Image (tube, coloured by chain):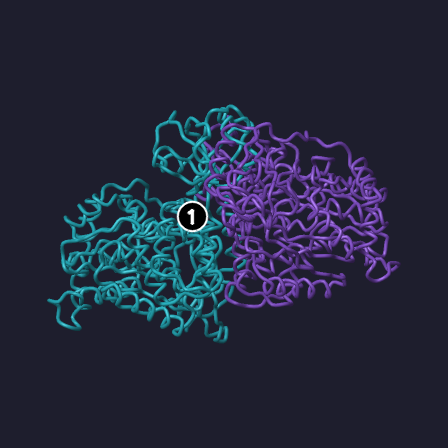
Chain colours: A purple, B cyan
Amino acid sequence: MSLADTARPQLKLRFIHLDTGRENVVVISRHSHALRPEIFRGFSRVELRQDSKVLLATLLITDDDGLVGPDEIGLSEPAFHRFARPPGSLVSVTPATSPVSLNAVRDKIQGKILSAAEIGAIVDDLAHYRYSDMEIAAFLISSASFMTSDELLALVDAMARAGTQIKWNVPIVVDKHCIGGIPGNRTSMIVVPIVAAHGLTIPKTSSRAITSPAGTADTMEVLTRVDLGVEQMKDVVAACKGCLVWGGHVNLSPADDILISVERPLSIDTREQMVASIMSKKIAVGSTHLLIDLPVGPTAKLANALDAMRLRKLFEFVGDHFGIAVEVITTDGRQPIGRGIGPVLEAQDVMAVLANDPAAPMDLREKSLRLAAHLLEYDPQMRGGSGYARARELLDSGAALKQMQKIIDAQGPSPCCNDVGDLAVDIASPDDGVVSGIDCLQLNRLARTAGAPINKGAGIRLFKKIGDRVEKDEPLYRIYAFDHSEQDLVATAAKASTGYAIDGGLPASNRRTA
Amino acid sequence: MSLADTARPQLKLRFIHLDTGRENVVVISRHSHALRPEIFRGFSRVELRQDSKVLLATLLITDDDGLVGPDEIGLSEPAFHRFARPPGSLVSVTPATSPVSLNAVRDKIQGKILSAAEIGAIVDDLAHYRYSDMEIAAFLISSASFMTSDELLALVDAMARAGTQIKWNVPIVVDKHCIGGIPGNRTSMIVVPIVAAHGLTIPKTSSRAITSPAGTADTMEVLTRVDLGVEQMKDVVAACKGCLVWGGHVNLSPADDILISVERPLSIDTREQMVASIMSKKIAVGSTHLLIDLPVGPTAKLANALDAMRLRKLFEFVGDHFGIAVEVITTDGRQPIGRGIGPVLEAQDVMAVLANDPAAPMDLREKSLRLAAHLLEYDPQMRGGSGYARARELLDSGAALKQMQKIIDAQGPSPCCNDVGDLAVDIASPDDGVVSGIDCLQLNRLARTAGAPINKGAGIRLFKKIGDRVEKDEPLYRIYAFDHSEQDLVATAAKASTGYAIDGGLPASNRRTA
């Protein structure tokens, strides 16, 4: 194919209005004088070139001369911005050859063990959008069945080095991370102000929800702006010791975002890939001390202590190699944390805890204090065992709330409103008894159906948690929505399956008095 | 997601001019009232539905209201034809859920062995375009590393049953197949008329070239029409005992075409997948007796006899299971067969052999006679060992040529011209000596660069084969092209690397006389 690179006529670059997600897509006319449509098939991969600038893209062919003319090539988002050449520029287009690093992927499929150089080349090509979706899938699946320790370390290293790498001029940079899956678990928004109020540096980046009703970035966005760039993030940390921003604009471990975009639709989630994803981002953001929260429960990501221990060992192994102090704790993942599910409702929980509101959810407060305690003890000045008391002092005194306000002011005003949905429906218990279990997956689904996280005020407020007594027809939770059809859907789904297990152990006559 | 299926507003179906290869693609407006673009991301998978009709597609989002309006959904080729609903029809669109059979693919990734039912469900979803490229890649790669014999049989069975299945009312239906890779190897076009002239039924379907300069269908198309449907193909076989048609319109083993479309760009080619591909098509076309040609040579697909034997055993195993008499022979794959490479030049070779032209390439004649001999001996009336003599008799007498003319007439007139390229350039030997090797891969590349198979008359005519003596500056071959820039490219490439190995063993004074 390389033979054909030089002599083809060139095409004029044009922007076209097609949003193609993260995939590079270009459009040419079937009557293009530069192309032989028989060679360039629809959906085949092509290479655009202008001088040293090269872009790989998926090709569409059109018969609609209004879209692109015969002497033009249309670049849609995000290809247009990645190629970064002005409209009218002359570019050549040739059939794409696969990235050379794909040979290593083929070796991996055959069961070979890859060198650090081979893995580095794969990650470099991934981070530069040179792999098609099917090529990304090939890499993921070939490494999902078996990966050596050395391969994992090489992967983490290459991923961390592929994007922004932040350095902080302080000896201790603490961070926390939860592997997710538990509704309402917004501890970061309490831990960060406590730890920052103490004086440790804690530059926290978080994700937005993709398959859950809220990510920390979505919930924080109810209170403040979260889409900061690296320099803005550094300014906030310089002023406040901590921040709570969305990772999307910071470009930490971009290969990870690309791998996730294929892992998620395929639902492939191996321990190695999870550890590589999290640790590459923590290395890139410059963390020196890291606390990992592994919730364990029947509907959590980790179902038992053995799975949690295996994952813990892997985090410790990678942390040790890269000189990051990693502490991994398992937490109660049997039910949601706090009372709210969905960005606005969760933000209300968080602010109630920070404001020492007596109605604040105690489980969110206690879990946050416990996590903050671990992080505070990374401070060499702290006496062993005093972390919890110090965390409680910073929370109870209002210092954490004050720090949170400072962070919110530094990050800037929230772009969204913070009303809860005006359509509310209560879901009643079908039985008398005691709540013996709550299905996190079902509550996540319901909150998403209600409109979260797109409608920030949609979601669920829980009235009952595990161990609570409930009477028949007493509300278990309230669902908030903005849209009548969504309200109907979620109410129907919740009535069919509340997500609650109720153990009715007591005789009816005792129910009211127990 | 299924909760959201019912209540969404519907969109008016519209055809749009985008050729997206074999991939289903739909386009909606960013201002569509039916969609929440935050849910429907660019390049995500969506499900279209009208009554019981369902189509999975990749979504593009446009800001260009001229392409699709806010109340419309644009379907491009091939989605429009697959969905098969008229423009203006109201359809609902929801985020797609992955096919259920993908769970079995995930199990396979984890190393599990799949049941016949699971493999059947995967193939059914593949054949109905329900897998995205990355999902197809996931299946291919998960099964590339390990597949049991039972899994292979289940795969072949499901693939064969997924499309057209042809039955012939005769006890013996013979077929031949070559695994490819050898330029000029157009034996089918000689074997079919010999075998049909004898009276055996031989309904041959062939592929078009994708990575080579010509497939049998491309070469046959120089002489006659090849894009016949099933009924037309049956009519030709009823009249002529044999046919030589393109498989693309016959819909044999459609899942195979879909797997190949991902195998090829990934360059994954396992023995199991090759055998499943070939055998599923042979079962579907109703073959009872099959001859497989495995060329072996340093630049052939099989480099040595051990690889060929392993592949032979796998073909025999599958053939035995499905009650197909399979004979597998290894042939000389060290160099091209015949003198022409490219559709018109190869068709000239074929017709010269059939016409008993003294200048016809003897290697093509001999190999074809040998293959025909094997097939003829499937006739119970033939005495053992008499196949070759009978094949030669049918060829030498002109009966095979006459049968070929009958097949050509029955299939209909060729849609293309049969001129060779008017731009010719000879590639000279850089040395005196004896041809000791010819690189099939390089000659394939050169013929493609010259324009084959798109320009049917582009290609290469060989003057020298292995064992031939050649003098410095004597032409090794002639390249034919239609386009000056392509001619320049191919001449430059051929001069840099002729593809010929020349052993100069003799002293210079002896060269002319040897």
Residue picked out by circle 1 = B99
Residue positioned most to the front: A509
- Residue A250, position in %: x, y? 72, 44
**Residue at screen point 56% across, 58% down:** A303
Which amino acid does the dot numbered 1 rest on?
Pro
**Residue at screen point 74% across, 57% down:** A290
For residue A457, which quarter of the picture? top right
Q: Quadrant of the C terminus of chain B?
A: bottom left
Q: Chain of mark 1?
A: B
Residue positioned most to the right: A381
Residue B325 left/right relative to B143: left
**Residue at screen point 69% across, 40% down:** A349
For residue B181, which quarter of the picture? bottom left
Given residues B302 and A378, the one toward you in this image is: A378
Regarding residue A37, the answer to whether it shows in the image is no
Residue positioned most to the left: B381
Regarding residue A477, the answer to whether it shows in the image is yes
- Residue A88, position in %: x, y? 62, 31
Given residues B12 and B300, the one toward you in this image is: B12
- Residue B500, position in %: x, y? 47, 64
Identify whether B421 is placed above or below B118.
above
Residue A168 left/right relative to B338: right
